[in-house]
Image (cartoon, grey):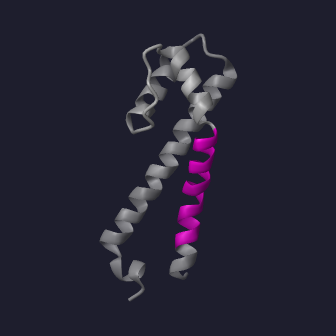
């Protein structure tokens, strides 16, 4: 398999996840503000912990809101897994990545 095919197959899921994450950002912020009135959206790694706490501890959230929080956590994990995969490819198989 060529480098281009590997790149496309490993990066497309992260790209789609990122687009879906950006499209749902306002809704997730509204849910987190509902859970914690002091929440300020910074959109960093700590947000996934806040999303998890909101999902785990809030019993007043609707089914749709809980589903959105689960999907948001899934989107973030897909992006992180893609990043980790590419770091490992660069470290373990640099000849394959650089096409030598």
Q: Which residue is at 49% across, 21% downward?
A: 54
Direction from residue 8 to residue 93 in the image, left or right: left
In the image, 14: left or right of 43?
Answer: right
Viewer-nearest residue: 28 or 12? 28
Farthest-out residue, bottom: 100
Residue 72 in the image: above or below residue 60: below
Residue 83: quadrant of the picture: bottom left
Q: Residue at x 60, y 31 (%)?
A: 26
The percent position of residue 50, horizontal first and vertical second, equals 43, 26
64 in relation to 94, above or below: above
**Magenta span: chief secondary structure:** helix
Pick the residue in front: 62 or 35.
Answer: 35
Q: Residue 31 colored magenta?
A: no
Looking at the image, the residue that sits furthest to the top is: 60
| 29 shown above or below 98 | above
Taking the spot 45% from the left edge, 37% from the top edge, the residue there is: 43
Q: In which quarter of the image is the C terminus?
A: bottom left
- Which quarter of the rendered picture does the N terminus lie within? bottom right
Provide residue 6's location: percent of width, then percent of height. 53, 73
Rendered residue at 55%/41% (across/down): 74
Residue 93 position within the rendered picture, expressed as x and y whole percent measured from the top left: 35, 76
Percent position (x, y) of residue 59?
Answer: 57, 11
| Quadrant of residue 94 within the rendered picture | bottom left
Total number of numbered labels? 0
Magenta residue span: 7-23
Q: Nearer the viewer, residue 91 or 34?
A: 34
Residue found at the far left of this picture: 91
Residue 73 sits above or below residue 3 on the image? above
Q: Within the magenta stretch, is there residue 9?
A: yes
């Amino acid at each position: 398999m060529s480098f281009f095919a590997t790149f496309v197959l490993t990066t497309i899921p992260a790209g789609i996840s990122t687009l879906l994450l950006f499209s749902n950002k306002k809704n997730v912020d509204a849910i987190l503000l509902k859970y914690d009135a002091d929440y300020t959206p910074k959109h960093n790694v700590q947000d996934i912990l806040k999303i998890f706490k909101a999902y785990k501890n809030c019993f007043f959230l609707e089914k749709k809101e809980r589903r959105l929080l689960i999907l948001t956590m899934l989107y973030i994990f897909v992006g992180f897994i893609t990043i980790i995969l590419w770091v490992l490819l660069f470290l373990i198989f640099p000849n394959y990545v650089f096409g030598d």
